[in-house]
Amino acid sequence: MEDQGQQEQASPEVHKRIQDSFDRQGLMRHLGARISHIAPGRVHIVLPARRELTQQHGYFHAGATSAIADSAGGYAAYTLFPEDSEVLTVEYKINLLAPAIGDHIEAVGTVLKSGRTLTVCQLEVHAVQDGRRKLVANGQQTLIRVNRPER
Amino acid sequence: MEDQGQQEQASPEVHKRIQDSFDRQGLMRHLGARISHIAPGRVHIVLPARRELTQQHGYFHAGATSAIADSAGGYAAYTLFPEDSEVLTVEYKINLLAPAIGDHIEAVGTVLKSGRTLTVCQLEVHAVQDGRRKLVANGQQTLIRVNRPER
Amino acid sequence: MEDQGQQEQASPEVHKRIQDSFDRQGLMRHLGARISHIAPGRVHIVLPARRELTQQHGYFHAGATSAIADSAGGYAAYTLFPEDSEVLTVEYKINLLAPAIGDHIEAVGTVLKSGRTLTVCQLEVHAVQDGRRKLVANGQQTLIRVNRPER
Amino acid sequence: MEDQGQQEQASPEVHKRIQDSFDRQGLMRHLGARISHIAPGRVHIVLPARRELTQQHGYFHAGATSAIADSAGGYAAYTLFPEDSEVLTVEYKINLLAPAIGDHIEAVGTVLKSGRTLTVCQLEVHAVQDGRRKLVANGQQTLIRVNRPER
């Protein structure tokens, strides 16, 4: 299902930093999402279908679709940030193009423009059923880099 | 916490129609969300804080914030629709204005323009801590009315 | 036509700073736009109807509507900035709610959240015909404060 | 400057329909914009630099950038519509990625999803200086097809 442009891999350090951050996101675990690919400037997140993720017609809820799209874009930006920084979503816009029906959905966040303060990502969500992929949502996201708070 | 402009209530029929639809949304139950108010053209949804809803810093995840904002706007639109119709989100845009920290968050969806085919809603999400409300997200949403599919 | 909430005025210094910047915008003059009100955190811009501003049906072109909305939001943010700073639009989203027909249109930009780096504004555009106002566009905008470049 | 993916051309009928509509847009003429390419599902619009299109720093005003982006997306959608229909912009969102400086800017509107009622387009604006292209704005737009009004 993750078939294109996946040759490139982020460094082990970046990979670990992002996986660690992801593992601290209670929502991603609660939804059942997992990171399926980390490349410099691009992150994929997969979310398998469950009754717990539906809207009133049984499709993936737009909230679930958006949640993994937002996280994919955030981590895509984060792959390009220095180690002592954090990423926050400023805003995003998403179009729901088709009912999200499938065995799972996959969000792909891709950095479009990486600036010193702000990063802009493109967001795509595909529904995958029996191996066929369909674009079900498309969006655009602005993120801000902030210094890591002391812990 | 739900203190302003709540005098107006939707009719029992509309109230039931929306509550029934909400109850079919697996995601809303899974997150722990509930409808707190239904007025003509305005719906409030409350989501109590839980470890399962966090992002990496322990705040409400933008995906949770957005999910209830999207549902609140969708049901706000739905209050004004004829009974044999359904509502679908076309797109939305949301700005995350401040960290969503609190005992709970409350999304308020309000119809801004109700057309024959398309409806535009304003979305607001407040974080409530010790009775104090803070606006943490603000958005705008486009929805489409579709005829109810045969079942 | 500018009838509500206009009691409050920005200081003469802010007023001058904004009018000077506006006067350097070749596009605003070319369209025929003028600032009609400057309050702290809110700016109004008026654009009279002309053949040169139409889309294919003779209404105000969405580009003209958006241009004054973007400027109104930008200057609304700028009213709250220190003197040695500049404002840039990061992004905006606008819904065109109704055909923009009238003697003139008026954009109102209002600061929703003013942060150290980023400001979020609400954008509204009204069409005014024979003294009646109609909301024709509604949007949301993110702006960034930058230090004034040396000149 | 228009160097990629331009082999495909719309039919003469579509080409004429779009050029005729464009010629009725007073704003496009007033700005000095012209259509540079019409393909099925994709339209390019070029806008040469002029003092009359600037913001306060002398760059292209976001309003000018957005105006041609909106028109490019609208006409891209229109290439796929039946002859007796019209297109209206429902909403769009645009990120301004870099200062728009150059000899001219070029907007490219591309249909991402064409539905019976709604169409979603991707918007890109490039600034071109001395033959070098730079992406200065990126956006996403929703459009609606309506039956042509009687004239």
Image: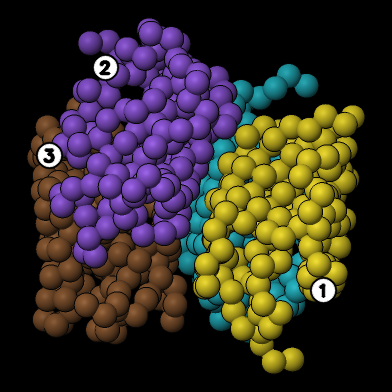
Chain colours: A yellow, B cyan, C brown, D purple
Mark 3, residues whose alpha carbon is within 10 Å: few (<14), some, or many (≥20)?
many
Residue lying furthest front: D130
Label 2 sits on residue: D20
> What type is the residue that disc 1 sits on?
Glu
Instruction: Identify which residue, C127 or D16, lies in the foreground.
Output: D16
Q: Residue at x 13, y 69 (%)?
A: C19
The chain identifier of the residue carrying mark 3 reads C
Three-letter amino acid code of the residue under disc 3: Ala
Q: Quadrant of the N terminus of chain B?
A: bottom right
Q: Quadrant of residue C104?
A: top left
Give the label on residue C49, or none. 3
SS for callout 1: helix
Position of residue D57 measured from the top left corner of the image (x, y, whole percent):
24, 65
Q: Amino acid at mark 2?
A: Asp
- Asked whether residue C6 appears in the rendered view, the answer is no
Q: Position of residue C109 (x, y in %)?
A: 29, 61
Query: Which residue is at a point 28% across and 47% down the rendered structure image?
Result: D103
Measured in 3D between alpha carbons, the distance from the residue under mark 1 to the one under mark 3, in whole angstroms, is: 58 Å
Image label count: 3
Mark 3 secondary-structure assignment? loop
Are discs 1 and 2 both within one chain?
no
Marks 1/2: CA–CA distance:
57 Å
